[in-house]
Image (cartoon, rainbow, N blue to C red):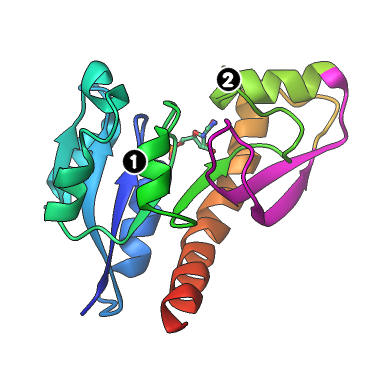
Amino acid sequence: MAIKIAIFASGAGSNTQRIIDYFKGNSNVQVRLIVCNNAEAGVLRIALNERITSLLIERSRFFKEASYLPILTEYGIDWIILAGFLWKIPEKMIEAYPHRIINIHPALLPKYGGKGMYGHHVHQAVLDAGDHESGITIHFVDEQYDHGLTIFQAKCPVANDDTPDSLAQKVHILEHKYFPQIIEQVILKKNKR
Ligand code: GAR
């Protein structure tokens, strides 16, 4: 039976689209559910177009310990992938999915992580610091923001004339290239054990 993943996303969903495309026709891994906390998010349209069930979640219920877990169980979710999801994952969910929640962060952690560090805030901070490189970090999720064990990093150069937008574009290229294949590697490896 296919390993089922839920993608948690609350933005445009470009990573979600890549992950869906990557696993299309793959009998080992199925994108079963899109979980979103923003009714306006582009990712909901992607779910609709791709005929994947979406679940619009609500803040108070999400943070009430374990209250969405039964739904994940109902859909048989084995892994959770955070692709632009900005809420902290509650402890009970982490306990229910030990080393089975993977996040992507648009910088080279441990730099530029933590609460409030998402999207353009991250790229602006990299530019403000005058760094010559940035990149992506794919990591397991633990109880702290952007903190769990790093699985993979890739780098891109930062040019003197980069803006948050141009840097975001470079970072997105890395994300789209690596995130789906790293997800596949990690989950197939773990499921073999
Ligand atoms: C991605 O760049 C991801 O790394 C970032 O949100 C973007 C979502 O883009 N995540 C964070 O900043 C988490 N702290 P997308 O909606 O086009 O996939």
The disc, 2 or 1, on the residue closer to the chain's N-terminal end is 1
Question: Which residue does the numbered mark 1 point to in the structure image?
Answer: 8
Which of the numbered marks, if any, corresponds to residue 159?
none
What residue sits 65% from the left and 30% below the top? Answer: 166
Front-most of 162 and 149? 149
For residue 152, side relative to residue 16 (left or right): right
Identified by mark 2, the residue type is Lys
Q: Disc 2 on helix, strand or loop?
A: loop
Residue 55 among magenta residues: no
Image mark count: 2
Residue 82 visible in the picture: no
Residue 177 visible in the picture: yes
Question: Which residue does the numbered mark 2 point to in the structure image?
Answer: 115
What residue sits 67% from the left and 25% below the top? Answer: 123
Q: What's the distance in space between the residues labelled 2 and 1, CA to CA?
A: 17 Å
**Pointer 2 and pointer 1: residues touching (CB < 8 Å)?**
no
Q: Disc 1 on helix, strand or loop?
A: strand
Q: Cβ of disc 1 within 8 Å of ligand 1?
A: no
Picture quadrant where residue 87 is located:
top left
Q: Find residue 104 and report its horizontal and vertical position in percent.
A: 54, 44
The segment highlighted magenta reads: 129-157
